[in-house]
Image (cartoon, rainbow, N blue to C red):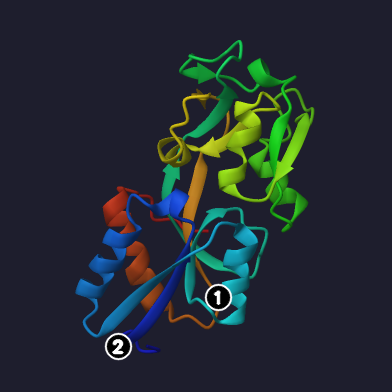
Amino acid sequence: MAGGLAGRLWLVCKPHATYEFAVTAAEAVESAVPGLAMDLVTVSTLPEELELLWSGGADAAFLWVPTGDERLRYAEVRTDRRMMALPGGHRLAGRTEVTLADLADEPVIVPEVRVSEDVTRHWLAEPRPDGRPALRGPKAPRIEDRLTPVARGRGVWLAPEPLRRYFPMSLVSWAHVTDAAPSRLALCWTARAPEALMARVAAEVRALTGWTCQNPA
């Protein structure tokens, strides 16, 4: 494993963000690196992913950046438009595009990730163009719990575009937020992971996602 030639690689991910390519990526890496077996571990929250990485339960993870953990090394593997989930009866429901100003007075469902305030502000698109913070609504720790309060009219939710396809709820309307920074998904790992192998995994995933920029942070 240390030489990148053989062994088992444990890769943790949230299926909502990676269902389009995770299984295919694992198979592609196994084909490209004979003797290497990849196992996918799925969880629902960022803290769970970070715990697996630092406890040794996983060698790498697919995480949206920023992660709030400056110790991690990473290579971006895809970008996605930022979407807004709106209640089905919302005044803007049915629009394909909105701006942050359109939603300035809307409470936003807060991802209760318990990692850092900077990560929370990123997911709320703070500060807003006028310098104000977002109006914070109910908190929800898991991705699958954030659409229920949206459907009940208790707030709106900012999310990467793949989550729209994973949750096609009839009570929720989705719109592209044109002035919100895109979401960036990365392959992340700790210092103990073999760098050459991580680079190979990132290259295989980028080939599947079509991500071409070669400037990882």
Using the image, tell me which numbered label, if any, was put on residue 6: 2
Quarter assignment of residue 157: top right
Q: Residue at x 65, y 26 (%)?
A: 152
Q: Earlier in the sequence, mark 2 or mark 1?
A: 2
Using the image, tell me which numbered label, if any, was put on residue 190: 1
Residue in front for this viewpoint, 164 or 59: 164
Mark 1 Cα within 10 Å, few/some/many (few <14, many 20+)?
Answer: some
Quarter assignment of residue 39: bottom left
47 versus 164 height, above or below: below
The quadrant of the image that shows the N terminus is: bottom left
- Is label 1 in a helix, a strand or a loop? loop
The answer to whether the residue labelled 2 contacts the one labelled 1, judged by CB atoms less than 8 Å apart, is no
Residue 110 image position (x, y, % from top left): 71, 40
Residue 17 image position (x, y, % from top left): 45, 50
In this rendering, would 164 be left or right of 131? left
Q: Is residue 135 visible?
A: yes
